[in-house]
Amino acid sequence: MRIWVVANTELGEKFEEHGGRHHRAALALGLDSRLINPLDVIIAQRSGSQPELISHSRPDVALFLDKDVHLAESLEACGVKVSNSAKAIRACDDKREMHIAFSRSNIPTPTTIILPRPYPSQPHHPTALLAAAKRLGFPLVAKASRGSFGAQVYLINDDDELIEIFSQNEMREAILQELVETSYGRDIRVHVASDRVICAISQRSSDDSLQANLTQGGVGEVIEPNGTEIDLALRAARAVGTDFCGVDLLIGEGDTRLVCEVNSNPHITRLSEITNIDCAKVDILSAIGQQTSTSK
């Protein structure tokens, strides 16, 4: 089987390691694997005929560790199985799309307000922002619709901070959420593949910040996920249609669980080191339609 690991390794050491780890896992499984930069993939399209992949020989499967939805869709149109699919990537890359999918699937999340999107020449309407904040109450959390590794996430304490944050262009497309104070600086990351929970860790901030992400300097510890955590992680993954993903859970009042988000391209180096599970291998097996024995 010919497989591509599509990863933009030019973005830094973290991305190079991420793509390389999956490529090495594919080779170890005996697959004909190539590590492909998405910027090198050229596809010609013409009405009435199938798109033509002209830059490389067509693979059977593309493990897509990137967020270029249109490239993923073009590969699918060429007859390539893309994992995760373009539809799943789109749902996970935009937090507005994601929370609409969660709502449709009746998945418990923090109360979320999807803000109207102004055009580039327009500001957000302050009255609308203040009305949304009044509904949620301060402090609250503002998130850009597109952001990774806990970036573009802000803890907002009052009206003035709210207006100031939303003067930034990166917040033109955004959501507001209630602050789950019982989960401040801590959460749970669950890795899901082939509709199974593979492993889970608790994450906590090391500097009293809101985000507990490992990439933000958080500390991780292996946990055995309980039935509620397994159920929520699987339901969230199904809601956005991923083959493999990382699901972040928050700890609600009364030790309940809420879904924070699903990552269609979770960076798994630290997770693999902490759990001693080769999550790259798990992702590859999921992409080619096989299951690993390490699962719940």
Image (cartoon, rainbow, N blue to C red):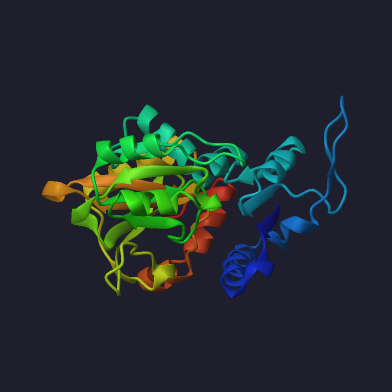
Q: Position of residue 23 (x, y in %)?
A: 64, 65
On the picture, is 76 further left or further right than 241?
right
Q: Position of residue 185 (x, y in %)?
A: 27, 63
Work out which residue is located at the far left of the displayed protein and give it.
Answer: 254
Q: Nearer the viewer, residue 165 or 98?
A: 165
Report whether residue 9 is seen. yes
Q: Quadrant of residue 161?
A: bottom left
Q: Position of residue 112 (x, y in %)?
A: 34, 38
Q: Is residue 189 above or below residue 278?
A: above
Q: Nearer the viewer, residue 61 or 250?
A: 250
Q: Is residue 294 above or below residue 272?
A: above
What residue do we see at 59% from left, 48% from top? 288
Q: Quadrant of residue 49?
A: top right
Q: Nearer the viewer, residue 237 or 171?
A: 171
Q: Position of residue 140 (x, y in %)?
A: 29, 49
On the picture, is 98 further left or further right than 138?
right
Q: Is residue 284 above or below residue 176?
A: below
What residue do we see at 33% from left, 56% from top? 155
On the picture, is 257 further left or further right than 78?
left
What residue do we see at 58% from left, 72% from top? 17
